[in-house]
Image (cartoon, grey):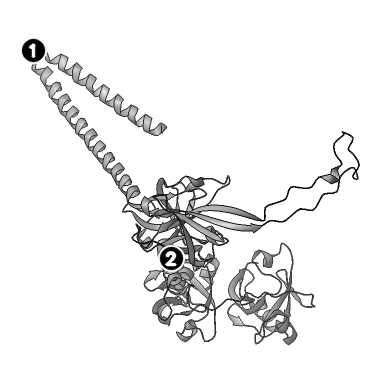
Amino acid sequence: MIRVFRSLGLAVGAAALLTGLVSITTFSVERPSLTGLLPLAVSEASGATALAADAKLEETAHAFEVLFNQVAEKVKPAVVNVKAVKIMKGEEFERFHPPFGGRESPFGEEPFDKFFRPRMPKEFRQQGFGSGVIVDPKGYILTNNHVVEEADEIYVTTADKKESKAKVIGRDAPTDVAVIKIEAENLPAAVLGDSDKIKVGDWAIAIGNPFGLNLTVTAGIISAVGRSQVGIADYEDFLQTDAAINPGNSGGPLLNLKGEVIGINTAIFTRTGGYQGIGFAIPINMAKTVMKSLIETGKVTRGWLGVAIQDITEELAKSFNIPTTTGALVSDVTPNSPAEKAGMQRGDVIVEFEGKEIRDISHLRNTVAQTLVGKEAKVKVLRSGKPVELTVTIGEQPTELFARGGGGPAEATKNFGMTLDTLTPEMARRFGYEGEMGVVVMDVEPGSVAERAGIQAGDLIKEVNKERLHNLQDYNSIVSKAPADKGLLLLVKRGNFTRYVIIQP
């Protein structure tokens, strides 16, 4: 508001100054001199130009305001308030032990054992509030999973203040997307846009119910795209915005200036619990894929390659002779997986998927997950620095099992702060590495080079500098031949996951 008043003040001041110049110049015209006419003509021309510029600026500003007005009026009818009710069972409290043993208190009150704690109600109805957006005239509503996941009852209030009970069509915790439905017809539905076209700096408008203040509209820009590793959901590819988002906005739409939904507001980064200029929205393309699957099947079916992948550091890029740190490094290929059948190999760097450049492992993971099962996808990899084109028939993602091995004392070689030993059949059974070969990390010294590289007890080292290991003797032989001033490239397996690690001496 202060900025607006200051802008108005500048406009008024400029107009006053302009008026003053014109009047002074007009006064000088009274002198019968040709030299006085030239400044008058120039001044009047400059004044006309300034007035025209001001009029154009005012027209542009008004058009911009009208655009925001239109977007808000267009989409507000499709934004709803979501009330999630959790029913909690109460219990009767037992009589508490009187502090004076049942005797009359020193202050003359009745004996304390005559008093009981107040009886609690049989049920508590705990309420939480969020937002949602109608995406189908038949009553389908997109919101966040965390808004409704623990609810026993869900109520939706539409823009015309009608409250309806809603049912859950499906929830997907890995993306924090949920679809709920109310029984209604001909509801105003928002238009879903294309979040792949969003660029940093684009205008963004958020509508929701922060702190219960229904249909609040805020505006800002897209601050970043493809934001991942935030720790909010398993699949993260967030749009970041500085449009004000607060508690209660969760599940509401993020819009472009066409009034299209480009994201579902889901979280804020804050130290205070309120708006601090960093909000995150699920890209609508991801939400659309999840929504379609939930409505059609009640669950989410995700695409699957069957590879273990990791981001590429500068050290890994040098080791694999690749010119870039973008893409995803394949550290393992699951037997009989779509990737193996397509000819993908360990050490390949996936740089393109269906013509889209792959930024990092989160980008690849999200892209593959949203690909239809059975689709033949074109994948470009770098193999030994050279491009290779592969065609992968996308499979269905299986249930993932996360197994982790333990550690134990052993008499073995110490290297880079690791205590190592040859993988024996007994160790393989203990750590879950049946059918594997290599050396097991039995212990890691705190503060050592190995610990800084992320090595943990129970890890299985399968390769050193791209050479397979059968036993500890292989490891020692390869390490002894490695240049002393260069690091070791290790292929390390932990549970079901394999990745490359560089240990720098």
The quadrant holding residue 445 is bottom right
Read off the residue under disc 1: 32
Front residue (pair 369, 291)? 291
Whether residue 205 is visible: yes
Does dot 2 land on a helix, a strand or a loop?
helix
Read off the residue under disc 2: 286
Task: Identify whether 10 is placed above or below 90.
Answer: above
Front residue (pair 218, 84)? 84
Marks 1 and 2: which is nearer the front? 2
At 30% from the left and 24% from the top, the residue drawn is 13
Does dot 1 land on a helix, a strand or a loop?
loop
Q: Are the residues tagged 1 and 2 within 8 Å (C-beta)?
A: no
Report x, y in % for residue 345: 50, 81
Within-10-Å neighbours for mark 2: few <14, some 14–19, many 20+: many
Q: Quadrant of the N terminus?
A: top left
Say what amino acid the circle numbered 1 marks.
Pro
Report x, y in % for residue 315: 55, 67
Say what amino acid the circle numbered 2 marks.
Met
Report x, y in % for residue 410: 79, 77
Task: Identify whether 299 is placed above or below 335.
Answer: above
* Of the image marks 1 and 2, the number of the one nearer the N terminus: 1
